[in-house]
Amino acid sequence: MRAARRNSEIGPETRPGAARPGHRAGPRRVLAALKLYWILASASVRAAMQYKFDFVTSSIIQAVTGAIDYYFVAVILWKFKTIAGWDIYEVGLLFAVSKIGIGIYRVFSEELEQFERYMVTGDFDSVLVRPWPSLLVVLSRRVDLSRLSLALQGMGVAAVCVPQLLRSGKLTWGDIGFLALACACSAVLFFVVGLAAASAAFWITRIDELQVFTQNAPATATLHPLEIYPGWLRVVLLTALPFGVGNYVPVRYLLGKGGTWMNLVWPLIACAVGLTVSLKLWHAGEAAYQSTGS
Amino acid sequence: MKESSIAIRASGLKKSYLVPVRKTGFMAGLRQVFSQDKREIRAVDNVSFEVPRGQFVGYIGPNGAGKSTTVKMLTGILHPTSGSVTVNGISPQRERQMLSREIGVVFGQRTQLWWDLPTVDSFDILAAMYDVSPGDYRRFKEEFHDLLGIGEFLNTPVRRLSLGQRMRADLAAAMLHRPEVLFLDEPTIGLDVVGKGKIREFLKRINEREGVTILLTTHDLRDIEELCDRVLVINHGNLVYDGDLANLRDRAGLPTALSVKYAVMPPGIRAGQYLARNGQPSPTPRDGAWMVTRVDAPNRTVEVAFDRTRSTAPAVLMAMQELGEVRDVSLTEPLIDDIIKRLLDDQ
């Protein structure tokens, strides 16, 4: 009988606390995680393609709403020529870095934006019975390619603004690499704030309004130069909700509007600190998870 | 008991929640928002038990008793407020990911499959997630087609499966990585008789042939009767019974019914009468006489109720044989729902 065979197999590997096969650590585990992420993410894209109409309309709606964001900024600039000393192409660069960042974030982390559902329905239970970190399982549930439209808007605006700024000598070709880094940092900072807001759901369950307050509003605010805001709001956008560190801080230095080379390093530091804090918050939340009744 | 022979160990397990005290009266809703008043709800309170490897345990109790909360603590979903748990010697809270490779979990009310994808895609994903080798995965599909008929709906999206098919798919998915311990939270809920039968047959097989330890919560007490070696009853977060079903029946003290069909209907016997140990009918209960609960003259059948803790079925039968020639005999145990209700009423 298999039960008897199993009992006879109880050896050092299956003693309490002993390491089990399959629970690898180190680089192999990371590679295995990436492979699993790829499999799960591909599955999520296949699942999304079951609803092609929804995919197409959602992409179009996001592209249009994003264009409206820039339209409002552009209208002000046509009227006043500059905002706090920033012309339309310079503001366009802020817009582009932010939109590319948020686009990348939303493609890979859309499930965090919907995380409230996991708490309300208790779906997080099924995440916790898998042999992988819960964040990996949650993120891989949905890769939302329709959110690429956000990044494409940013790239479109960059395609117009960057050549103008290169021609006017405000940017050099060497700055393009730093701009790409700024976009990546911006994406990470959106992830940091998104993860922290999602983690709050472990304690307060409903986070829709919190997500609007911590992401949508400040993300829109950082489409403009921070000089137009009062001091306290600038502090918020450079610390607690650090989206300004992702676009304003490096772009300001690259356009020669102030700051030092440290403006290019601060986004990296903010990403490292932010990731550490929000991951700790997530793990604390996981332990505090209350589930729902059955 | 040797550590290695224990699959599940719960010790002083407690889970409590703080919930706001509901306000009443003037502007209750607004006062509720600013209120700091909280009270403690103990979902599970000081529960301890051990389950040896290979045992099939029924974990039962009324709604809100703490069954699902216990299962969630045993599987690492919830962290206990106090007490400790080990499953296969592993702490579900400290080593959740490691434990996940050794257990299977099925929540009857919630699928763990990928809703919009064909069922086989869910199995493919889980095979990758649990590092199941291609050979083992191929064997799984063949074996589980035989056991649960999963081949019939492998290419159907999960959202289009019937409840019975979905539950079979969920069970197969939970067994894909060959776990040693299986936690089932109401796996037969909502299924028809045929569906329940298939699931029970499957569970019995994997428990008996493969030695999988199973802890099952259910409201369908036929699951318990047909499958479980042992029953744990929980009520208001406390374990109120731990033993086998026969003892539970005895403890509840509800009557068992012995029904006898005679060659010729005995004269003068009526429902409500008593039957003495010497087989003589009596209008009053005396000297341990048993009550005649049903008389069906056209079918020549008489039913007598007796308490298993005080009498045995052969003793009752001997008395009933005094009434006439017996053609057929049947024994009906009390319904398990009634047993649980009686047990909880006595607490």
Image: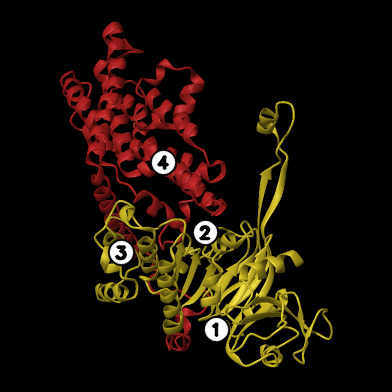
Chain colours: A red, B yellow
The Cα–Cα distance between marks 4 and 3, rounded to whole angstroms, is 25 Å
| Amino acid type, mark 3 | Phe
Give the number of the mark in front: 1 or 3.
3
Residue at which label 3 appears: B123
Say few, some or many: other residues with alpha carbon within 10 Å of mark 2 (under 14 / 14 to 19 / 20 or more). many
Give the image quarter of residue A189.
top left
Q: Are marks 2 and 1 on the same chain?
A: yes
Residue A218: tell me if it is visible: yes
Callout 3 secondary element: helix
Residue B285, given in percent of the width and then of the height, sits at: 82, 80
In the picture, the quarter occupied by the N terminus of chain A is bottom left
The Cα–Cα distance between marks 1 and 3, rounded to whole angstroms, is 31 Å
Residue at which label 2 appears: B77
Q: Chain of mark 4?
A: A
As drawn, the label of residue A114 is: 4
Callout 4 secondary element: loop
Q: Is the C-beta separation of discs 1 and 3 under 8 Å? A: no
Give the image quarter of residue B98.
bottom left
Residue A213 vertical position relative to residue B140 in the rendered view, above or below: above
| Amino acid type, mark 4 | Gln
Residue B35 vertical position relative to residue B111 in the rendered view, above or below: above
Q: Chain of mark 2?
A: B
Give me the residue at 58% from left, 69% from top. B59
The answer to whether residue B273 is left or right of residue A246 is right
Q: Are marks 2 and 3 on the same chain?
A: yes
Residue at which label 1 appears: B5
Say few, some or many: other residues with alpha carbon within 10 Å of mark 1 (under 14 / 14 to 19 / 20 or more). some
As drawn, the label of residue A250 is: none
In this rendered view, identify the residue nearer to me: B194 or A124.
B194
The Cα–Cα distance between marks 2 and 1, rounded to whole angstroms, is 24 Å
Q: Are marks 4 and 1 on the same chain?
A: no
Q: Is the C-beta separation of discs 4 and 2 under 8 Å? A: no
